[in-house]
Amino acid sequence: MTHQSIATIAAQAGNHLDDKKAVALPLYFSSNYRHDSLAEAKNFDPHQGYTYSRIATPNRRALEETMAKLEGGTAGFAVSSGMAAIQLALSILKTGDQVISLDDLYGGDFRYFRYLHAHAGIGFDQWNGKHLDDLIAKLTPHTKIIWLETPSNPMMKELDIAQVAAAVHQQNPHILIMVDNTFYTPVYQRPLTVGADVVVHSATKYLSGHNDLLGGILVCKDQQLAEKYFNYYITTGDTLDSFDSWLLLRSLKTLTVRVKQHTKNAQAVVKYLQADPRIAQILYPGKGGMISFYVKHDQDVAKLLDNVKLITFAESLGGIESLITIPYYQTHADVDIDQRHRLGITPQLLRLSVGLEDAKDLIADLKQALDQ
Ligand SMILES: *Cc1c(COP(=O)(O)O)cnc(C)c1O
């Protein structure tokens, strides 16, 4: 039922699945499942039944099916972290293949790209996201994947996924467009419905939304690609366990209301930051809960980070609790220093994940910290 709205799919996550007719899908703790007969074991379909929990669990499957629907894809994969989802996405590469990525990405991506370059002979190139012609000029016969994030982390670069996908696919329909949709979630953006081939999430962020689990999601459209991913993850075994799958499915039920309220709160905080003379510049794409901003004077960076009381100085994002980080020293410390400066990731840039507290209290907290 792809015509259902995101809110409906999310609210109904896991419903009508339990054979004992439980409304909320129970948590299945079992590493294995019995066979009724030799005939059943011989005809076993790993996409339907259950044998061993690395292959499938009822909780993980419910989560994966829900995510596939939310993203408008055919198959979903739930793994142990966002980085594991990125590893799964790139698992189809062979030595000699090339990936072109946006130049502003989650810091761990670059670390993994460097690893793949050194150990597997994969080529990497970067695009600044400005002119499509520049991206097209970078394509080579070895280009297999275009890797995008929008809005990007932490510079909030925005891309038109449909335009990028159309331009690249016109050159070569076999190049896969992959999008990290962690920041916007399917509530604001469904890359697969506008031409992308693969979507990944750090489910640790908005999808789970409560700062209490680590998880990753991959959703794709193509059946053959889905089969490759399935075989890879049941073999390598970084699949998400039942308990975290259960928690994550539970979180998805409130995804739409949470994300919309994150936006309302972030918009109110942006208004305050715009009016505060101690803030030099704000990067906010207009929706979502993530704000990056430059503080004018170095001493105010320390004032903010040392004195926030309600807001927590911690990495990560997308949860109910507001968090503030300094990407230069934290999330993006592994990005080459020249690249950090070229992108504008300076020691004056802070990133705020606006939570679901009352916006008035968040603003008061920022103000009292700066006033110290
Ligand atoms: C956090 C994050 C990741 C990595 O996810 P983990 O769950 O921490 O492994 C990847 N992409 C983006 C955009 C992120 O914010």
Image (cartoon, helix red, strand yellow):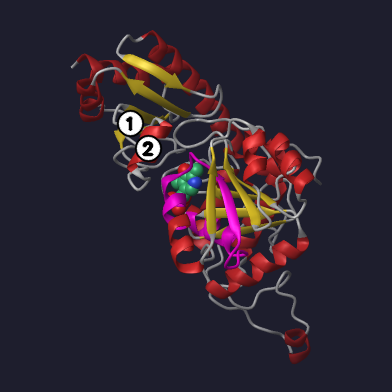
Depth check, front residue: 183 or 210 = 183
Q: Magenta stretch?
A: 83-112
* Image coordinates for residue 288, horizontal then vertical, percent: 54, 29
At a point 62% along the width and 31% down the height, the residue shown is 131
Amino acid residing under circle 1: Thr
Q: Are marks 2 and 1 in contact (CB under 8 Å)?
A: yes
Q: Identify which residue is drawn at 78% across, 83% down.
A: 43
- Give the left or right position of residue 330, taking residue 37 as reference: left
Q: Which mark is residue 331?
A: none
Q: Position of residue 249 (x, y in %)?
A: 58, 51
The foreground one among 157 and 279 is 157
Amino acid type, label 2: Arg
Where residue 71 appears, as percent x and y from the top left, is 69, 45
Q: Position of residue 247 (x, y in %)?
A: 51, 52
Which residue in the protein does label 2 denote? Answer: 340
Asked if the residue at label 2 sits under 8 Å from ligand 1, the reply is no
Mark 1 is surrounded, within 10 Å at the Cα level, by few (under 14), some (14 to 19) or many (20 or more) other residues, namely some
Please report whichever mark, 2 or 1, sits nearer to the chain's N-terminal start. Answer: 2
Q: Which disc is residue 346 wearing?
A: 1
